[in-house]
Amino acid sequence: MSGFPILSIMLAVPFLGALWCLFAPGSAESRDQNARVTALAATLIDFALGIVLWVQYVPGGPRWQFVENSNLFGKFSWALGIDGIAMLLIVLSVFLMPICILASWKSITKRVPLYMATFLVTEIMMLGVFMAQDLYLFYVFFEGGLIPMYMTIGIWGGARRIYASYKFFLYTLLGSVLMLIAMLYMTQHAGTTSIPQLMAYNFTSQAQTWLWLCFFASFAVKMPMWPVHTWLPDAHVEAPTAGSVILAGVLLKLAGYGFIRFSLPMFPEASAHWMWLVFALSMIATVYTALVALVQKDMKKLIAYSSVAHMALVTFGLFAFNQQGIEGGFLVMLGHGLVSGALFLCVGVVYDRLHTREISRYGGIADNMPAYATFFLFFTMASVGLPGLSNFPGEFLSMMGTYEQSSWAAFIAVTGIITGAAYMLYLYRRIAFGPRKNADAAAMPDLEPREWLTLAPIALAVLWMGVYPESFLKPIRGDVVLLLERLHPTAPASDAALKIPHKPAAAAVAGEH
Amino acid sequence: MDYVSSFALSLPEEILSAGAIVLMLVVAWAGDKSARVIGYVSVALLAAAAVALIGAPTSGAVGYAGAFHADTFAGFAKLLIYVSSAVAILIAPGFFETDNEPLRAEYSVLILLAAVGMGMMVSAADLLTLYVGLELNSLASYVLASFLRRDSRSAESGLKYFVLGALASGILLYGISLLYGFSGGTGFATVAQAFHGTTHGDPAYYGLLFGLVFVLAGLAFKIAAVPFHMWTPDVYEGAPTPVTAFFASAPKVAAMALTTRVAISAMGPATHDWQQIVIFCALASTILGGVAAIGQTNIKRLLAYSSINNVGFILFGLVPGTAEGASSVLFYLTIYIAMTLGSLICVLQMRTKDGLPTEQIASLAGLSRTRPGLAAAFAIFMFSLAGIPPLFGFWGKWEVFSALVAAGFWPLALIGIATSVIGAFYYLKIVKTIYFDEPAVELAPSRSLIEGVLIAIAALFVSPLGYLLIPAIELGTNAAAKSLF
């Protein structure tokens, strides 16, 4: 594949699509339809290219593959390249994008060309973040993603869309600008803007401490971690369905990716030093957001809080400093991307029919929407962490890693699984079972073919991840080993009396499935 | 150096002054009918002056017995000044001719004279050249501010600018006299030597220090840095919009370049003394420029506060007093004039159906439905002013903060960049009005091709395509900054 700039092409396709959405001639209606078709075509092409990436990617090959580098900008360069971690996140993004376009096919009726163009720009920014091999290229994509998301929430959002869009933008901006200063400091001292080189550079432990905090400010907001998570429920509730899917499915993964790519390998000492902070915040998030989710009256808000709780499992795993933890944290990211995306789609399906997200307005819809209720149950079970579905392997590995590092943290983390089951099953009971108390809810028609097309692929992927997670672990294993080698000299002492050796454990875990 | 070679060094200024005088005579006979033609001739003169920069005027030589510095730093600043002046001339007819009175042909001549003054400011190697250049620019500006004679707001703007400008000139002149008295000369080199020769505790040192404070206060007025910013919102609001565009761009470049040169060439040995002043002004400007803009309902007032906010960021580049810092100042200015000119030309386009200009932010509501092109350009300028990547405005902030961090000022950089989030709020407010709100007043379609073209050029420059220009601009700013040291 050398010489064929597949990554640049993956960025160019949505860009051209966005231009055609905006500038295609014709009457208002034909332009709307043209924008839908163009956006779907562009995202499908990117999905096909994503599959090519996955097929062509050589696990155990060179660490960075599909590398491109040209010094276009003087002070930083157009450097792209991916490892297994980035590759899987790219595949997740391009997989969810066509589904988002399909989900907005009918529900978005005003300013369709602009909507589709905004979505395609979002896709460029997300893919760029995962592909960037240059510090500032990463930053440009990372921050640039704010603009289209701000527009999506602000123009096509719900009643409190203005408030939510401001909150989303300013919260994440404040976190990110601090990261910029840290990046400037890093380039001054390391003399390079290349991410792979910086990943091998040793900063002094004093510098690491505050560099880590600056990056943490950005990633903690984006993740989101307690107590800076409050923008997320607002943004989710107000965003249109597809916006929520992308927000939960991909944008929240940017922070986890940031931890893997920046915080851990670049500042290993500081990561070990601040492990207690990450664990403490994750413990609070696990307990607190689960309790908050239990009392929500709004479906989207409930799922949003469940996202915060799931993200706590990611941070637990990533900062466990062992293979199980990091691989588990990553799998939770992938699994949550699929499942929460699907859950938001499920909410969107009924919202399109009844235009309310109030849980109490529904009830007993398993009778009149059996297919829908089946899908919803399937994804609810996946979210709860039922073995055989996508979230189980990740959650299990993540908690195993956490337990190895700190039994107390693991103890708290496991309560999250129990409460998670509580609020998700409670939600499902109130919506799908019970008496059909609302006539309009009881009259809703079941899924139409377009909705089948959005939910079925995700369901298949969820099942695949649950039954054979090795497909998703194999590409990242080499990268995780390299990361652990980097972390090993400074890894904090674990409180486990019986240390599990790294290599055999990985093989054992792989063999279990 | 003999006078012939000195003349060669100031060729651009000669072209502009001679041209301005001839055009003034033409205007006296031809009258206001000739306004458009005079405008095009003036733009041609500015282009000729820009071409004349190649060669002796950027050779780095010092002419006129040490009073005039013809280096690349001045050359780069002059290029920016000429471009912004030309834009201010080009956009004028569209504004004035649709207004209650025709464009008076002296408009272009005044801008040419202001450009001469600004050229002298950035080339100054002597406190007197500095003062003469500054006054020439200011006097032309006072007239321009009150150019709509029958509009009381415009007259008020001119008067306010004049009174406060005279006060600032007085402060500046007082500082110059102190520097002269304690150093024994007015040349920047002499002043620098005097600073070099004294130490803390020396009586002469305090005299020089007072001179430094007063000179910086006078210059802070010209660049509208807090706490000398009070005139800006009133003047920007009252002045005719093309004049506001001019004020926000060319004189900002000139005064900022001048401040940089004075701080580095004349007061270089006292860097630690002026640093604290600049740090205060920079932080105060970014914070006040951000907070005060939030409540504004008039777009020109808001852009005035935005310019105060941006001046704060430019001053951050000056703080380290290094070549990298000076280079970042010029880089930021380059991007800044594109953003500010672009957004003010967008303001020019704000006319209601009956052709009356409107400046209310509320009248932008729903612009993205009625005029999507203009709305997109406006949004690009706003996001760029807020410094959000992938727009090019981000790179200006990058340059400035990179220079700060390189000089070890990272705590200041952290605070400074956090203040940029305050500013982001009101830029977002404009985007929100344009894109999220329901249409209120329908704006008239554009009548001016040239405004559309200029908006498109500026928008393309600050779009991500601008990043491709980084190596080229960097080449210029680095060469310019090097000539200061």
Image (cartoon, coloured by chain):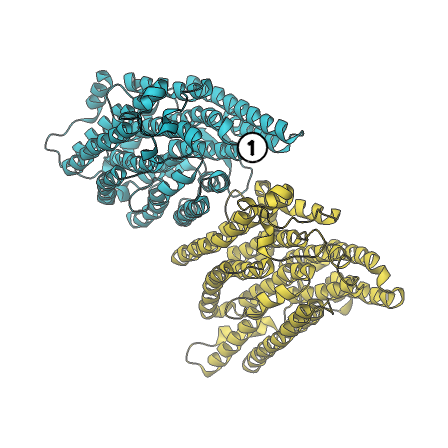
Chain colours: A cyan, B yellow
Q: Residue at x 54, y 29 (%)?
A: A14
Q: Is residue A387 left or right of residue B205?
A: left
Q: Which residue in the structure is indicated by mark 1?
A: A112
Measured along the vertical axis of the image, is residue B53 above or below residue A476?
Answer: below
Q: Nearer the viewer, residue A29 or B377?
A: A29
SS at mark 1 in the image: helix
Q: Quadrant of residue B172?
A: bottom right
Q: Quadrant of the C terminus of chain B?
A: bottom right
Q: Amino acid at mark 1?
A: Val
A23, B167: nearer the viewer: A23
Decide if residue B234 is on the left or right side of residue A352: right
The image position of residue A436, as x and y in percent, is: 31, 26
Up-down relation of residue B417 to residue A294 (above or below): below
Does residue A256 lie above or below A435 as drawn? below
Q: Look at 79% across and 54% down and name the residue there.
A: B44
For this orientation, the residue located farthest to the right is: B29
Residue A52 x/y as whole percent = 46, 18
Residue B74: image quadrant is: bottom right
User: Who's the residue at 34% across and 27% down the image?
Assistant: A339
Estimate how packed mark 1 is, as few (under 14), some (14 to 19) or many (20 or more) residues with alpha carbons within 10 Å: many
Residue B112 in view in this figure:
yes
Task: Count the marks.
Answer: 1
Give percent across and percent down for residue A13: 55, 27
Q: Classify residue A276 by image quadrant.
A: top left
